[in-house]
Amino acid sequence: EPINVYKPVAPNIGIVDGPFEYLTVGGVKMPLPFTTRMTVVRLSNGDLFLHSPIKFDETLAEELRGLGRVRHLVSPNQFHYAHIGEWARAFPETIAWASPRVRRRARARHVDVDFTRDLDASAPEEWRREIDQTLFPGGYFKEFIFFHKASKTLILADAILNIELDKVTEPWRTATKFTGMYHPYGQIFFGMRLPLLLQRQKAEAAIRKIHSWQPLRILLSHGRCFDTDAENAIRRIFGDPPR
């Protein structure tokens, strides 16, 4: 709380916490609420970069209009895309950026979204001077990770989860404890762990790059962000930089 309100964390970057949503499996809504959050970066030309857009809200949209021009709607992985179409319809001049497999997933779930550009391992011209990026391997769960240079902020979606146990009920609270993905510890999403072992070279390259950025904070889509001591959190979660 409060939700649907821009909260600055450093100059030209902030977060917006959204409403609870529910995981749907095979068309069935599971009784597991999860928190949602998007990160907003204001680029030097006034364009806004929206990472993992949350459910559209007109009051929030009006607040963002006061910050800059909503321009880039970014799906960091194939699971964080559901509300991009809503934002694109409200802001027709936006560019919707697709992650791997997200088009197929959206079609299969009949989600109305028209992706116009594809993300790549290298940052595009539109933001490369201010935001760097890398593709973090994880098999089916691979994800683009971003780094806002000026504020030294790492921006993640599902690569790390740091769930606050007081926000979930049983039996999900106990299940979360077993995965280790809870505050204040946080861990790599369990679905990524085996693929990371099988894709060792790609994983090491991505982890090496993350270490080279030397972030001061880590913003997450789910759970408590790491507002301080990010370097120690990265070493604990990803290990020392690969040689």
Image (cartoon, grey):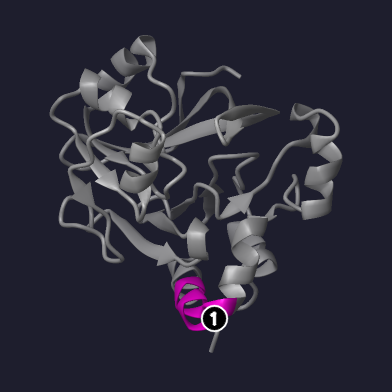
Side of 13 where 17 appears, left or right: right
Report if residue 11 lies within the magenta region: no
Q: Which residue is drawn at 23% across and 41% down?
A: 115
Where residue 235 sits, quadrant-wise, is bottom right
Identify the secondary structure beneath mark 1.
helix
Q: Residue 169: where, in percent of width, then height?
A: 81, 28
The percent coordinates of residue 49 (x first, y second) are 29, 39
Is 67 left, or right, of 162 in this rendering?
Answer: left
Q: In this view, does 209 lie to the left or right of 111?
A: right
Residue 106 image position (x, y, % from top left): 36, 38
Which residue is nearer to you in this view: 43 or 243?
Answer: 243
Q: Quadrant of residue 32?
A: top right
Q: Residue at x 85, y 34 (%)?
A: 171
Above-or-below relation of 30 to 231: above
196 or 129, nearer to the observer:
196
- Identify the magenta region: 198-207
Residue furthest to the bottom: 243
Which residue is at the front of the view, 133 or 12?
Answer: 133
Give the residue type at disc 1.
Arg
Q: How many marks?
A: 1
Q: Name the residue under label 1.
A: 200
Q: Residue at x 60, y 53 (%)?
A: 160
Report the quarter where the N terminus lies.
Answer: top right
Asked if residue 115 is positioned above or below residue 16 in the image, the reply reads below
Residue 113, by quadrant, is top left
Instruction: Tell me the residue at 39%/55% (across/down).
Output: 146
Q: For the stretch drawn in magenta, what is the main secondary structure? A: helix
